Image (spheres, rainbow, N blue to C red):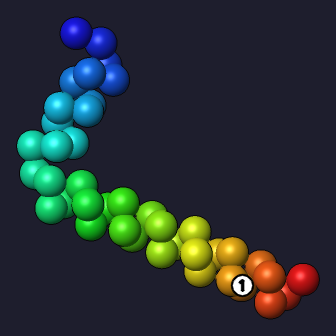
Amino acid sequence: MTFLDLAWKNAWRKPLRTILLMICVAVAFLIYGLTASFLA
């Protein structure tokens, strides 16, 4: 079992936490993109 297999299985042990993390990362990129476009 590789490290990526272990990380993938561990990430989906608690699916709600994984989905919330993905949403938070997406919102962070969205905010960064919006502020970068306003300052350009």
Estimate the x, y position of residue 34 in percent, counting from the top left.
69, 83
Kindly give the residue lying farthest to the bottom in the view shown.
Answer: 38
Estimate the x, y position of residue 15 in percent, counting from the top left.
14, 53
Count of marks overlaid on the render: 1
Estimate the x, y position of residue 24 in percent, counting from the top left.
39, 70
Kindly give the residue lying farthest to the left in the view shown.
Answer: 13
Dot 1 falls on a residue whose secondary structure is helix
Quadrant location of the N terminus?
A: top left
Estimate the x, y position of residue 8 in percent, counting from the top left.
26, 33
Query: At 30% across and 12% down in the image, what residue appears?
Result: 2
Query: At 77% across and 79% down in the image, what residue appears?
Result: 36
Q: Quadrant of residue 13?
A: top left
Query: At 69% across and 75% down in the image, what residue appears?
Result: 33
Image height check: is 21 above or below 5? below
Image height check: is 26 above or below 13? below
Rate crowding at label 1 as few (under 14), some (14 to 19) or many (20 or more) other CA atoms within 10 Å: few
Is 2 on the left-hand or right-hand side of 39? Answer: left
Is 4 on the left-hand or right-hand side of 13? Answer: right
Is 36 on the left-hand or right-hand side of 5? Answer: right
Image height check: is 16 above or below 34? above
Kindly give the residue lying farthest to the top in the view shown.
Answer: 1
Quadrant location of the C terminus?
A: bottom right
Residue type indicated by callout 1: Thr
Residue bearing mark 1: 35
